[in-house]
Structure formats: C-alpha cells, structure tokens
Amino acid sequence: MANDPRQDLVAGSEVDAHHGHRKRLRERIYRGDNSLLDHEPVEYLLALHNRRGDTKRRAKELLDQFGGIGGLLGAPPEVLRREGVSPAQLGALKIAELTARRLLEAKVAEQPVISDGQSLLDYLKVAMAHRQTEEVRVLFLDAKNRLISNDAMWTGTIDESAIHVREIVKRALDLQAAALILVHNHPSGDPTPSRQDIRLTQELLAAARPLKLSVHDHLVIGGDGHASLRAQGHL
C-alpha cells in the first residue's frame, strides 16, 4: 500500500520544526546564554544522537525523575541505561559531567584551597552530592594550603573510624602534607553530621595534633546542601 503523501508532509514538517528549534538552541549555547533553562542543554545533548525525535520532552522527564541537572549528570550509568538512555546519549551526558568536574577541579587547584571556599564547594557538589553510595575524600594540602592530592580514600560507611584515621594519617605523611580537609557525602541528601561523622573528626584531630598536621574542616555534602563540622564547633 502506498504511503499517504499527507503523512509524509506532516512528518517532514515535524523534522523541519525540530531542525529550526535545535538550530536556535545551538546558537544560544554558542553565545553562552545564561537564560537557558536546565532542560535545554540536556535536550541538546540528547539530540546529538537523536536528530529526528522530540528530545525536549525527554529531557524534562529525566530532570524530573533525577531531581535536576546535578542528579541527572551524576546518576550511575547503569541507572540511566535502565531508564532508556541510549549508549550514545549516555556518553554525551557523562562527558558533560566530566567536563564540569574537570573545570572546577582546575579552579580549585589554581590557588590556596581555603581562600576560595565557594569554588571548593562547587567542585565537591558536582563530584559528590548526587552519588548513590557514600564516599570519603581527603584533600591534602601543603604549608601554603595549596592542593597536593585529592584522594578518594574509601566508599561505604565510616563506622570503623580508627582504621580510617590511620589510613588518612599515613597518606598525609607519605605526601608530606601540612594540612587536610576531610569530605564525605550523604546519599540521603541530608548533610546533617551523624554521631559517627563527629567521632571520626575528633579521632582524626587527636591523631593529627602531635604530628602538627592541621585539620581545616570536615565537610558533609548532600543534595540538600552541605555542613561544616568546623562551623558547628566540632573542630
């Protein structure tokens, strides 16, 4: 049976409409248009590998499902695949996440870490706020508070605080670090420090003091914000 020419005309019109919309969107991205809504760069990333389909609606669905652009970009690949994100689209999303993280890492490394606390928090939120498992990182600093190393020390709970303190102190000595910042995330989103978080902080302080190793802070990162144990009076 021959195709209905009217259907071909409608399909062609839809393709033309998508093409025009994406061209305008591309031009806004080129200009660095700060008025872009969160779904628009995601829509464009998805469209790189789906040139004929409606990726605007799909972008909005994914953002709603993952709680925003941070949650979407930080979602594990296996979770995104289960939600129907194609391998090519997954690659585009993960490149965007990696690029954002690298840019923020470079900004943190350019100057003494504690002199630009907002840049540090921006980086940590991108790197850790939307992880679905708990991760503990330690930023090891030199005598001028410049970053020596940014180490993911372990994943999982921090109940075995004595073991973790030994690992941190040993690594600091190996790096000849003068100071450190302890950081971990709460997958629940709530950054309120737990009793275990406070105990780890206190035990680390006790171990670091005789070595003249400064503990600048212990930061807890969550999707709902962050908490500083120094600001709360635990250091």
Image (cartoon, rainbow, N blue to C red):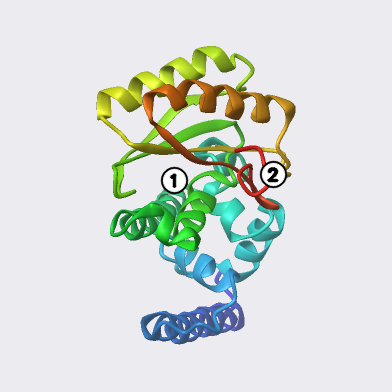
Q: Identify the residue at horizontal 65%, vertical 37% (top origin).
A: 234
Dividing the picture into quadrants, the one containing residue 200 is top right
Q: Is residue 190 left or right of residue 157?
A: right
On-image quarter of the N terminus: bottom right
How far across and how far down the image is residue 111, in percent?
Answer: 31, 59
Q: Is residue 85 left or right of residue 109?
A: right
How far across and how far down the image is residue 52, in percent?
Answer: 49, 69
Callout 1: 10 Å neighbours few (<14), some, many (20+)?
few
Residue indicated by mark 2: 191
Query: Who is closer to the viewer here, 61 or 69?
Result: 69
How far across and how far down the image is residue 31, in percent?
Answer: 38, 86
Query: Who is closer to the viewer here, 65 or 198?
Result: 198
Question: For numbered disc 2, what is the local secondary structure?
Answer: loop
Q: Is residue 108 left or right of residue 218?
A: left
Q: Identify the residue at horizontal 53%, vertical 47% (top origin).
A: 74
Query: Who is closer to the viewer here, 45 or 110?
Result: 110
Residue indicated by mark 1: 87
Q: Is residue 79 left or right of residue 168?
A: right
